[in-house]
Amino acid sequence: MSDVKVYDVLPDAAAKAHINDKQYQAMYAHSISDPSDFWAQQARNFITWFKEWDKVQDWDYYTGKTRWFEGAKLNVSYNCLDRHLASRGDQVAIIWEGDDPKVDKKITYRQLYEQVCRFANVLKERGVKKGDRVCIYLPMIPEAAVAMLACARIGAVHSVVFGGFSPESLKDRILDSGCQVVITANEGLRGGRSVPLKANVDKALTSCPGIHTVIVVKHTQHQPTWQTGKDIWYHEEVAKVSTECPAEEMDAEDPLFILYTSGSTGKPKGVLHTSGGYILYTAMTHKYIFDYHDGDIYWCTADVGWVTGHSYIIYGPLANGAVTLMFEGVPTYPDASRFWQVVDKHQVNIFYTAPTAIRALMGKGNALVEQTSRKSLRILGSVGEPINPEAWEWYYHVVGEGRCPIVDTWWQTETGGILITPLPGATPLKPGSATRPFFGVVPAIVNNEGEVLEGEAEGNLVITRSWPSQMRTVFGDHQRFIDTYLKTYPGNYFTGDGARRDKDGYYWITGRVDDVLNVSGHRLGTAEVESALVLHEKVAEAAVVGYPHDIKGQGIYAYVTLMADVQPSEALRKELINLVRSEIGAIATPDIIQWAPGLPKTRSGKIMRRILRKIAANEISNLGDISTLADPGVVDNLIETRSNK
Ligand code: WT7
């Protein structure tokens, strides 16, 4: 890898940037040598506190105690709204671009403030109090931002569920977090098609007796099934209440939200984030990593159903008084130049998207990009999965015309904000590398025995000390938090990712080292897909692995063993695919199902996934040691029938 291309910091980017390389070095050194002093300064700089903290940090990677700014008081919605009113009440806060290119809307900070206050009052009238959990199952419409901020305003804990998840997944999340209220829309719109959100909620609620209220945004003309008393229209309720609602004084460590994410085992975990550290870290990273300056138009294409949407569409940007663009649609509708058309239409300066979208658009040819201007663009971002150098180069040269630094930002639902990333005015770029740690972040690479590797190294990526927006616990299961993240390499936070560090200290994320898949930047546990498959009465056993996929990054490859007297068929394959879609959602659709008369197992009965991954990737020439298998013949059979997929 010695011939890796290096792109020096662009002179224009360096001239404009908040932080140049010298400042990065100095600030990073300060953040490591005296973290409490560093974070106290940042906390005063970025956040308005009702009362300052007693102690900046207090954490322990053995017990899983994580506290930042303990004793401090603040309100996150106050930081995103109220404090901006005097200086930028009439400035646009949210530009909303609908699925239909003819439909858009601009909302100023004052309008957003009033909508949030009104909706907070509606929640209060329905009995929602500080600490209560509220489920948000909405499309990408401004009401999603309003609902999140309204919860934050009254101290309720939101749990946003991505609108692409099935009723079954929604139900699991509602039950696990103990929500009493769901906020949804009659329908969502994506790529010209409607998504039956309210109908999905109705299905989920057949087994959620705790839900007493469903607040429905009327987004299309469709009239959903209605249960008087339980179902109420958003527009009718907000019209009845006041535009003032005092912001609840919250402790820095009071919960802000729960967001479910997949792990290597069991059902998705409720990742819990709290208030003070989270809002500080997302505001600060948003400003420095995207080099946000007042008046810039910033667009992150994620969905608010994922952490990227929470931290970098809503909380970080709004805390900074930014103009944040929310897009309801998809990159390929009405055609595959939509992203660039929206960039021109709203004069977007900073654009943040996922490698899977870049690869998909790259495949449609340069003409669709080149027919647009994109002159407004200044900074490009990437998130969600490793970006391959080919896609990076295309993004840099074709989309950015060589004028815009790319920030390849590595982070996770659990980290709350970006941990490893370039800074546009400070970091020379290497295509495919997330480069260097952000302030206060100390990554390390350990081998499987847990020994820390120095210098150039490859192994498992851990973070050796806490940072303000670290997840605090798994909701309702602190032991699972400790077991998942802190037990593997004691004294460290284990990311689940593999990484390589090069001679310049740059990090290259190599992908998950556990049984977590990353399909189009969406995270899925292999165990979740397997559990869905074995629900079918004709399925005896299933093993799911990821395999390299040109556009999705990883595809889903399922090995399925049928019950003794069942014959495989096309019809059965379709049934299984539909089963997974209805259990989890369309994002979990298996790409390949291979009928497997037997699975490779050790004598103790453990499935050897390493072998299944190799067969799926068609790397059958180096299967490694298969002598420990109970029946090595199984492997030959899987290889022979592989082409029958
Ligand atoms: C996993 C976390 C963070 C917001 C979106 C995903 C992978 C994320 C990168 C990147 C290489 C990346 C990792 C990580 N990942 N960003 N820039 N380069 N890999 O959040 O759903 O919690 O997934 O996404 O494997 O562990 P998430």
Image: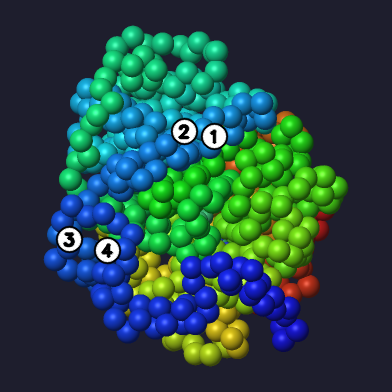
Relative side of 145 to 53, left or right: right
In the rendered image, residue 460, in percent from the top left (x then y), is placed at: 50, 75
Q: Are marks 1 and 2 in contact (CB under 8 Å)?
A: yes
Residue 40 vs 230, above or below: the answer is below
Q: Quadrant of the N terminus?
A: bottom right
Judge left or right: residue 631 versus residue 115.
right
Tags 1 and 3 touching, CB below 8 Å: no
Q: 205 and 216: which one is in front?
A: 216
The residue type indicated by label 3 comes to Glu
Regarding mark 4 in the picture, which secondary structure is present there? helix
Which is more N-terminal, label 2 or label 4? 4
- Distance, label 1 to label 4, CA atoms, is 31 Å
Q: Which residue in the structure is indicated by mark 3?
A: 52
Q: Quick one: label 4, few (<14), some, or many (20+) residues within 10 Å?
A: few
Name which residue lies at 17% across and 63% down. 53
| Tag 4 residue | 44
Identify residue for label 1: 96
- Marks 4 and 2, how far apart in space? 28 Å
Residue at horizontal 55 percent and vertical 18 percent from the top: 220
Query: Which residue is at a point 58% across and 71% down the rendered structure image?
Result: 15
Q: Residue at x 82, y 49 (%)?
A: 370
Image location (x, y in percent) of residue 217: 44, 22
- Residue 152 lies, with reference to residue 46, above or below; the image says above
Look at the image and tell me whether residue 282 can be seen.
yes
